[in-house]
Amino acid sequence: MATQPKTAITPTRIEDYAEWYQQVVKASDMADRSPVRGCMVIKPWGYALWENIVRELDDLFKSTGVKNAYFPLFIPISFLEREAEHVEGFAKECAVVTHHRLEKNAAGGLTPAGELAEPLVVRPTSETIIGDSFAKWVSSYRDLPLLINQWVNVVRWEMRTRIFLRTSEFLWQEGHTVHATPEDALARTHQMLDIYAHFVQDYLGMPVIKGRKTATERFPGAVDTLCIEAMMQDRKALQAGTSHFLGQNFAKASGIKFQTPEEKEEFAWTTSWGTSTRMIGGLIMTHGDDDGVIMPPRVSPAHLVLLPIFKNEDERANVMTYTESLAAELRNTHYHHARLRVEIDERDIGGARGWEWIKKGIPLRVEIGPRDIAENAVFVARRDMDHRKKTSIKRDVFVKTIGNLLDEIQGNLLKRAGDYTHSHTRVIDDSDAFYDFFTPENPEKPEIHGGFAMSHWCGEAACEAKIKEDLTVTIRCIPLENTTEKGRCICCGKPSEARVVFAKAY
Amino acid sequence: MATQPKTAITPTRIEDYAEWYQQVVKASDMADRSPVRGCMVIKPWGYALWENIVRELDDLFKSTGVKNAYFPLFIPISFLEREAEHVEGFAKECAVVTHHRLEKNAAGGLTPAGELAEPLVVRPTSETIIGDSFAKWVSSYRDLPLLINQWVNVVRWEMRTRIFLRTSEFLWQEGHTVHATPEDALARTHQMLDIYAHFVQDYLGMPVIKGRKTATERFPGAVDTLCIEAMMQDRKALQAGTSHFLGQNFAKASGIKFQTPEEKEEFAWTTSWGTSTRMIGGLIMTHGDDDGVIMPPRVSPAHLVLLPIFKNEDERANVMTYTESLAAELRNTHYHHARLRVEIDERDIGGARGWEWIKKGIPLRVEIGPRDIAENAVFVARRDMDHRKKTSIKRDVFVKTIGNLLDEIQGNLLKRAGDYTHSHTRVIDDSDAFYDFFTPENPEKPEIHGGFAMSHWCGEAACEAKIKEDLTVTIRCIPLENTTEKGRCICCGKPSEARVVFAKAY
Ligand SMILES: [Zn+2]
Ligand SMILES: [Zn+2]
């Protein structure tokens, strides 16, 4: 009789999903809490993932003509006062710099001194300060489109934080573009959403629904907010990227005007779009299992680890020579327009070694012992399969086919996540069924329940509010690839033109 | 009779070097002042240069086993209180966060609210907060060496700022390593200095002197500070990178201890090393001429610009087809392990177009007109030569030899800078000659004067202080590649063992 397999992570997802997440992050060695409330330390394994995400997304941006720039960390408080709506939505909880010096006090400690005439806010987003520059940079239709992005840290003071998902400081990119016509700006809004969807699906392996936010959920000041929404394994939705069409609102607030070919002065049309380290939280929650993180190969900090196995110094010399030569060969091999990223771990710590790499989610673990060398083979385990399943592969075959192996894992992760999303997405037209779907059987300690409900909505904010109040369920988006379909609002029964995605959300 | 050639930048270097610098930066479109006092906006042309610098340096770091991570922007004030010496040297002028919320006030404006129990400092450097993490990460000799770097923004409140050279916020990298022995830590200190010297010379084209700081100029808390110093065209020195051996000082302040193989607990040995956007200021001041910036090809935001020339729509179609096809061919060509970065500028703005690219410092300007196309040739101008000198080159030859052309420019820039540094470096043993060397003829409006004086120094801080007081000249470094040579201190006449580099400095 097979014994119940032990999991590397306690509790498991089913036992306590939120705590499972914290333990997975810890076990993966990706990040740490910091002594600064709500801020995180991103450790090398987590930061290398972020670097890969940045490199790939950045290439995609640049291929559409976007250029990077850098704007100041600080924003004068008067800039925020100008945009009341913006502040309502965003800038209330932020870090405020009021002094520019430290002085020794009588107790030998340090006291803030040199009070600023005008306090500065640490950017929660850079809309206003970028707008100030754009107003100077743009004067003629010839200057348009202006396509700018920056990769920076931002701060939004958070009381309840969770690493990668909600932290006071996080890393992100914010793109800001200026156009001469609403059509151009709208096309750009969709183009960037498409890039996000492509990246999140084909690199992070997370299936997403592209959609439009309701007026309630829209970015403050936006005419239209597009988003991609993904289902996590607790069946909640995570927004993995947003792209905003700002009409002329932002241009008017910032004074971004241009002269048309007909020499008329007009306010420009702008967009903004962003993604953040939150994507890493989404990746973990989409693919992770009860043994830890599973990294999609295209962005994984490393593609494989070589685990030499030896019993004595004699064996060691032989095995290490073989391992180093295989590593060198692999590092000269390309996978998905980059060189293979190969780790070697020769620590003598027994079974803990393999488990560490499982918990880190490295796609391939490759054992190399004297017996394998004798057969000129390696012993390969895939992170997307049972940890006990290992296959002997001839060295030359392994080197030649490793790209296929990695592609298989990449595809498998996306397929698994797609199947999961699909199996927890329900077309619901009955109000009772809707309330049942989103109500856990155990209200004390809610089990994993719900998912995406594709239901009709009349378009009224009141219905949205009632459902949110009753169930903490919100309209994640109105899918872009929606077929028009008449129906009746799941809340009030009034006529509806199309289904929307209801879900609990991060 | 030839007329005096007009320069693109006014004033010229000789007329007013400081103002020339500001005008060159402006004309290059690399960066802007910002509405936030002392902060800069790095525009796409400047930021692309920084991205190339980051990519190349980062590869060099990683090739030695360094891994990147990310530590919080904020540092609790109590962390700084622990390290008195550190604060003395560094953290006095910094941005202090005292509140975490904005509230609407009666006047409709915003007021800081939510006072923090403990103020936070925006990192002027991350030594202390990294030390806090390292103390948790290191417990055994098996955890060593620990080799960590981060690329981040830092803030040091500055009253008198100059773009790239001294700004309140700037971008930098700070490397921090932990070792089990002083020998390992010292070797790492030198290894990183060598990487800096290699990068600054072979990528930025700036000749440097590697040396050691005197006790007076040393980093607070360091046992030894190594640096590279380069001569600008006003003959002042610019420190382009530093690498510190911190002994056990930093480990003791942060509690970084490890268990030795003999199971003894010991404080670790640490290093830190950094470079910043200041390098960009150095690059501009080293290579720039009276027509603007000159970009070294290896890090230039773009390698060449194609400038199509046409008189009517018919010509335009033909010329643009040729231009696009050449661009595509060039973009598939590699230069120094990267694809060629090609700009196309088809704006119809007359001679201003060529001048814009000259001021931006792009290495090659390539004109393509109907006559060139008829001959299947292009008309090439090099930024390191007189702007009127243009050469017709057959297209296939151009594509085949562009790498050599760029290498020639790269080499030429380094050679020119080397010749300049050499011709303004003097061996001086006479005190009067020393004072003459560093005294301008026109004290009202000092002309470019001085340079590097290789003179003897007895080792006393008093002599260093006197020379600084008299001439604002400091010891930039004690060269590492010094030959021992007996002599007498340029200040007091006491015996000296070796020459040091005296200069005015940025
Ligand atoms: Zn309704
Ligand atoms: Zn002396």
Image: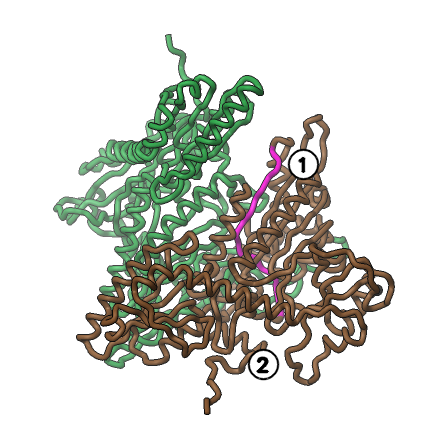
Chain colours: A brown, B green
Is residue B405 covered in magenta? no
Does A426 sit above or below residue B452? below
The number of numbered badges drawn on the structure is: 2
**Does dot 2 land on a helix, a strand or a loop?**
loop
Front residue of A63/B345: it is: A63
Left or right placement of residue A426 versus residue A320 in this view: right
Is residue A150 covered in magenta? yes
Horizontal and vertical percent position of residue B355 = 47, 25
Extreme residue in the bottom direction? A1
Horizontal and vertical percent position of residue B506 = 38, 42
Residue topped by disc 1:
A180
Can residue A365 be seen?
A: yes
Horizontal and vertical percent position of residue A137 = 60, 36
Front residue of B487/B79: it is: B79
Can residue B39 be seen?
A: no
Q: Amino acid at mark 2?
A: Ile
Residue under mark 2: which chain is it in?
A: A
Residue topped by disc 2:
A14
- Toward which corner of the image does residue A255 lie, by quadrant? top right
Q: Amino acid at mark 1?
A: Ala
**Does dot 1 land on a helix, a strand or a loop?**
loop
Horizontal and vertical percent position of residue B367 = 44, 24
Front residue of B329/A484: it is: A484
Callouts 2 and 1 on one subunit = yes
- The answer for how far apart the CA atoms under marks 2 and 1 are is 52 Å
Q: Residues within 10 Å of mark 1 (few under 14, many from 20)?
A: many
Extreme residue in the top direction? B1
Does A372 sit above or below residue A335? below
- What span is in magenta? A143-159
Residue under mark 1: which chain is it in?
A: A
